[in-house]
Image (cartoon, rainbow, N blue to C red):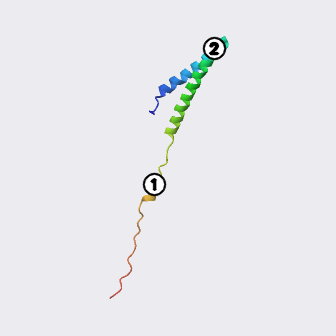
Amino acid sequence: MLWPDPAQRDRLAEIRDNLIARIIEAKREGWLGEAEGLQISLAGAQDKLAQLDAEAARRSTAVSLGMPTFGQIAVRTEVVKAPPSTPD
């Protein structure tokens, strides 16, 4: 899935809001069949918004790859004095 354009998500939210207003109007006018059809469309719009939000949340979550830090991989060296030489 391609990263969604924020304008597309905003447009889908507008459609959802419009569907809610139309459902309220249909119920007020007694158009029960119309209200039922709009409810189905509303459920689809809400599902799509939930998918977009879940995808955005998934992509924004950082994933640890277990990469070591510099301190863990840097070689530490110590100066070791050579033992005194013994005469032959």
User: Depth check: 86 or 35 in front?
Assistant: 35
Check disc 1: other Cα within 10 Å, few if <14, some if 14-19, many if 20+. Answer: few
Q: Amino acid at mark 1?
A: Thr
In terms of secondary structure, where does tag 1 sit? loop
Name the residue located 49 percent from the left edge and 45 percent from the top edge.
63
Residue 24, disc: none
Q: What amino acid is found at the position of numbered circle 2 in the picture?
A: Ala
Q: Residue furthest bottom?
A: 88
Q: Is residue 20 visible?
A: no
Q: Is residue 21 left or right of 55 when viewed as pictured?
A: right
Q: Which residue is mark 2?
A: 26
Quick one: 9 or 71, which is closer to the camera? 9
* Residue named by callout 1: 69
Viewed as shown, does residue 26 lie left or right of 14? right
Where residue 9 appears, as percent x and y from the top left, is: 51, 27
Residue drawn at x 46%, y 28% is 5
Q: Is residue 81 left or right of residue 62?
A: left
Question: Quarter of the image holding residue 80?
Answer: bottom left
